[in-house]
Structures are given as structure tokens and as C-alpha cells.
Amino acid sequence: MSRLIRAGKLDPAHYRDTRVHLIHNEDALNPLGASSKVNAEWGFLTHLRDIGRDTASDWLARHYDAIGEHATIDLKATL
């Protein structure tokens, strides 16, 4: 969308520039096996919550200034 707006192909009065961000932690989640998807044990769920909190805190420390300014992921390269 952003590229089309800049190229004049979309009316900026009707479309907004998009800023995409991705918060992920493959290092923490990749080692988990398929069985983890059905693991509802409280200790495991709190472990996942803590991974999410730590990952979000780390991401915010690195990218806070980008919020509302520019994307922090190159969708074309990622997809």
C-alpha cells in the first residue's frame, strides 16, 4: 500500500501508509516440539507468557522509535 500511495496509484485521502512490525522469538520457540501445541500445563503456559513478555520488552527497547514512523520488517524480503 505504501508503495502504491507514493507512486500516486492510490488516493492518500482513502488509504493510509502502513507500518508493519513483527515481534517473534524463533530461538525460544523452535525447540518446542509439536506436542507443545496441546500442552496446557500451567508451568508451560507461564513459561510461554514469560517468553512473550521478554521478547516484547527486547523488541520495544530496539524499535520503540520506529512505532508510528516506519515499518521494522521488510515484508517483500520476508514473504
Image: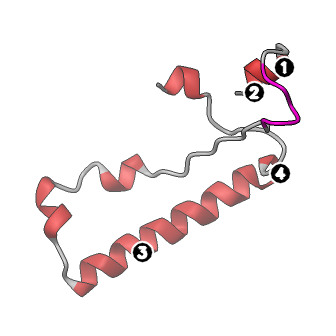
**Structural distance between the alpha carbons of marks 1 and 2:** 6 Å
Residue 29: x, y in percent? 32, 54
In the displayed structure, does residue 8 sit left or right of residue 48?
right
Say which residue label 1 marks. 6
First in sequence: mark 4 vs mark 2: 2
Q: Which residues are magenta?
A: 10-15
Q: As shown in the figure, which amino acid type bears the numbered disc 3? A: Arg
Q: Which mark is residue 49?
A: 3
Judge whether 7 appears above or below 1 on screen: above
Badge 2 is on which residue? 2
Q: Residue 37 at x, y = what percent?
A: 19, 62
Q: Secondary structure at mark 4?
A: helix
* Quarter of the figure with residue 10: top right
Discs 1, 2 touching: Cβ within 8 Å: yes
Q: Are marks 4 and 2 in contact (CB under 8 Å)?
A: no
Residue drawn at x 78%, y 15% is 9
Q: How far apart are the two marked residues, 4 and 2, measured between alpha carbons? A: 19 Å
Q: Earlier in the sequence, mark 1 or mark 3?
A: 1
Image: 53 above or below 55: below
What kind of element bears circle 2?
helix
Q: Earlier in the sequence, mark 4 or mark 1?
A: 1
Q: CA distance from mark 2 to mark 3?
A: 33 Å
Q: Position of residue 32 (x, y in %)?
A: 22, 56
Name the front one of labels 4 and 1.
Answer: 1
Query: Which image quarter is the N terminus in?
Result: top right
Neighbor class of circle 3 (other Cα within 10 Å; few <14, some 14-19, many 20+) is few
The residue furthest bottom is 42
Disc 4 designates what residue? 65
Q: Residue at x 65, y 41 (%)?
A: 20
